[in-house]
Image: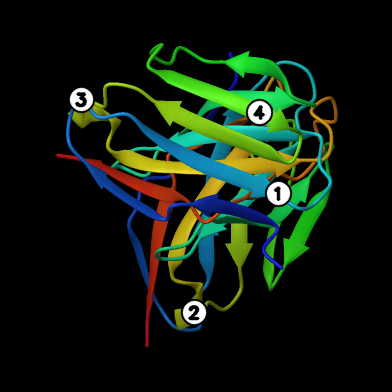
Amino acid sequence: GNSVTQMEGPVTLSEEAFLTINCTYTATGYPSLFWYVQYPGEGLQLLLKATKADDKGSNKGFEATYRKETTSFHLEKGSVQVSDSAVYFCALSGPRYALNFGKGTSLLVTP
Amino acid sequence: DTAVSQTPKYLVTQMGNDKSIKCEQNLGHDTMYWYKQDSKKFLKIMFSYNNKELIINETVPNRFSPKSPDKAHLNLHINSLELGDSAVYFCASSQDIRRVTDTQYFGPGTRLTVL
């Protein structure tokens, strides 16, 4: 079945550091891929998405490229800020259209 | 205007009680979902409805019963609450369940604590 594997957290970075959060997936067919972010005490917000192979999603300085050959959708940001501290979820659209989420990666950015 | 709203935000109750969580979306979407987030932040689908019709019913105990009076509302009723039901429950909506590219929009969550 469909599944998503994310790197375990927590990840702690200094402000302005480079961020990578790895995400790989197993899926049948051609799912869409998503990154959602959950700020403390809040619900999930879509950060970016990609709907077909080689698509790059981007938003707020974050990027991720849908790589079918490596079944990956790694999240990157060139320079993180304290306000980026949150939990990041990789997800794919499942065969019955619900989202299959990874376990989430907690990011803490320190000044 | 809040796109997807849930009430209540916090719910503390005793084991064995029955409780309901309400969800409303004003986005004009056809599809609504309930997800459960456990203490380790893991999110799992529970139910989905499309135009008031049940589409997904994961292996959730029968004590959980979703109800969709219209396509803008999806409520979750839980009977005989157990300690293990303590979690954060998120409602979400999307335009059309058949479009795998659609973004799902999430509510703020309801934190349920069963004592």
Residue A88 vertical placement versus A53 (above, below)? below
Query: Residue type at mark 2?
Result: Ser
Disc 2 crowd rating (10 Å Cα; few below 14, some 14-19, many 20+) is few
Query: Residue type at mark 1?
Result: Gln
Q: Name the residue under label 1.
A: B25
Q: Distance between the residues labelled 1 and 3?
A: 30 Å
Q: Distance between the residues labelled 1 and 2?
A: 28 Å
Q: Do the residues labelled 2 and 3 touch (CB within 8 Å)?
A: no
Quick one: quadrant of the C terminus of chain B? top left
Q: Left or right of A64: which side holds B30?
A: right
Q: Mark 4 points at which residue?
A: B68
How many marks can you see?
4
Callout 4: SS: strand
Quick one: quadrant of the N terminus of chain B? bottom right
Q: Are marks 1 and 4 on the same chain?
A: yes
Q: Which of marks 1 and 3 is nearer the N terminus?
A: 3
Q: Mark 2 points at which residue?
A: A83
Between disc 1 and disc 3, the foreground one is 3
Query: Residue type at mark 4?
Result: Ser
